[in-house]
Amino acid sequence: MERTEINEILEESDRFIRSFGHVLPPFAYWSPEELRTRTASDAAQIAANRLGWDITDYGQGRFDELGLFLFTVRNGSAEDLTRGRGMLYAEKIMISRDKQLSPMHRHNIKAEDIINRGGGRLVLELFSSADDGSPDPEAEVAVLTDGVLRRMKAGSRLALDPGESVTLMPGDWHAFWAENGDVLIGEVSTVNDDLTDNVFREPIGRFSSIIEDTAPRHLLVSDYDVWLSR
């Protein structure tokens, strides 16, 4: 993806989020220079726990068809989970554009609530895991939807209207997309680790390769390792 496109998506996404009366935290709007300065002093946890902007086309170069916007608002650490105490949770804001696919994947550690916060309808395709960890084409899928247990056939599609949510446990395979308009999505989960805890059915990447055709408006979490060490 070109940095110009990423900058445009950041602005469009911020406007979409604000249209629902939601405002991102102050650090979302720091310049790269301020983020570099602050993470070296009083805001080290922003970089350490990878809070902030995240735009991915899964390395395929077709963002409108295959992609997702995310912003990690808060996140604990793997050390917290190991100790069983501390900040054991994470929260994200996401946007799935109309008919934009987030591909089939599961998590080894993370349990998550996926919440339709507004817009169109959010559709999820669901599978349980087979013994080898792959999607099981036969096994029943059982998930909680706002506290109500739902049992479905493998590969069933679960549609969430605004206000509805689903709880996914480690090993639950899921792909999702928006229908009838873009969807603002909330994610509340255990500690999030996008570097190691995403298992995709197809051999694709989690982060995008960026062509630096212009300066970044804001840094993505995938920029931190390079840009914050300069």
Image: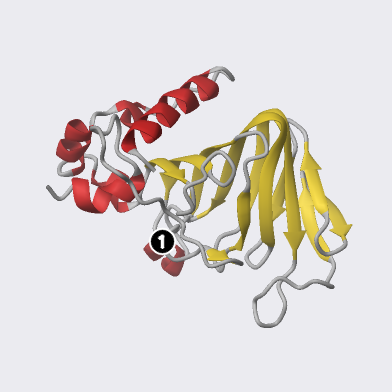
Q: Position of residue 50 (x, y in %)?
A: 35, 49
Q: Position of residue 119 (x, y in %)?
A: 68, 26
**In the displayed structure, does residue 210 sit left or right of residue 40?**
right
Say what secondary structure mark 1 lies in. Answer: loop
State the residue lying farthest toward the bottom.
Answer: 132
Q: Amino acid at mark 1?
A: Leu
Residue, disc 1: 195
Q: Quadrant of residue 109?
A: bottom right
Nearest the eye: 19 or 177: 177
Q: Is residue 17 above or below residue 73?
A: above
Nearest the eye: 81 or 59: 59
Which quadrant of the figure contains the N terminus? top left
Q: Is residue 185 above or below residue 58?
A: above
Local crowd size for mark 1, using a 10 Å CA cut-off: few (<14), some (14–19), many (≥20): few
**In the displayed structure, does residue 12 sit left or right of residue 172?**
left
Q: Quadrant of residue 39?
A: top left
Q: Position of residue 216 (x, y in %)?
A: 27, 34
Q: Is residue 16 above or below residue 111?
A: above
Residue drawn at point x = 49 percent, y = 64 percent: 197
Residue drawn at point x = 19 percent, y = 37 percent: 38
